[in-house]
Structures are given as C-alpha cells and as structure tokens.
Amino acid sequence: MSGMLKITLVKSMIGRPEKHRKVLRGMGLTKVNRTVELQNTPSVQGMVAKVSHLVVAEEK
C-alpha cells in the first residue's frame, strides 16, 4: 500500500454536500484542476472513494 497517489479535482464542489467539501479540503483540494500528492493509505483511499465522482486519482 505504500506509494503516492496523485489526486486532481476535476469537477467543482459548488452545490455539493458539506461532507464532500470537507473531504476535499482535508485532502488540500480547493480549486478545479489542482493536483495534490498524498501517501497511499487506507484513510486517503476512503477519502477518494467518498468523492470519486469529483476527482481523478492515479498511482504514482
């Protein structure tokens, strides 16, 4: 499970539930087309699963 995930916000969080917004902010995503690199851990995988319709995640 080690490694990095490259996560890009591809859809706006406007009109999304507050839970989704909090997850995105927790990952460090605030604007569309921003990319962050996070450790591939179970907690990060869960966050990506919650907002999978808004982000694109690729293993690095």
Image: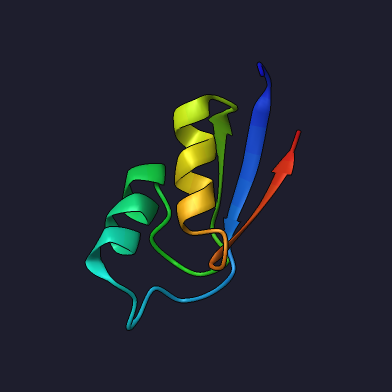
Quadrant of the image occupied by residue 16: bottom left
How many numbered callouts? Answer: 0
Q: Nearer the viewer, residue 54 or 8?
A: 54
From the top left corner, tell me how far across and down residue 11 is, in percent.
Answer: 53, 74
Q: In percent of the image, x 39 and y 54: which residue is there?
A: 24
From the top left corner, tell me how far across and down residue 12 is, in percent.
Answer: 46, 76
Q: Nearer the viewer, residue 18 or 31?
A: 18
From the top left corner, tell me how far across and down residue 25 is, in percent.
Answer: 33, 52
In the picture as drawn, the residue positioned furthest to the bottom comes out as: 15
Q: In percent of the image, x 43 and y 54: which residue is there?
A: 29
Quadrant where the C terminus is found in the figure:
top right
Horizontal side, residue 58 vs residue 31: left or right: right
In the picture as drawn, the residue positioned furthest to the left comes out as: 18
Q: In percent of the image, x 68 and y 21: which residue is there?
A: 3
Query: Coloring scheme of the render?
Result: rainbow
> With respect to residue 30, does 5 lie above or below?
above
> With respect to residue 24, does 38 lie above or below?
above
Quadrant where the N terminus is found in the figure:
top right
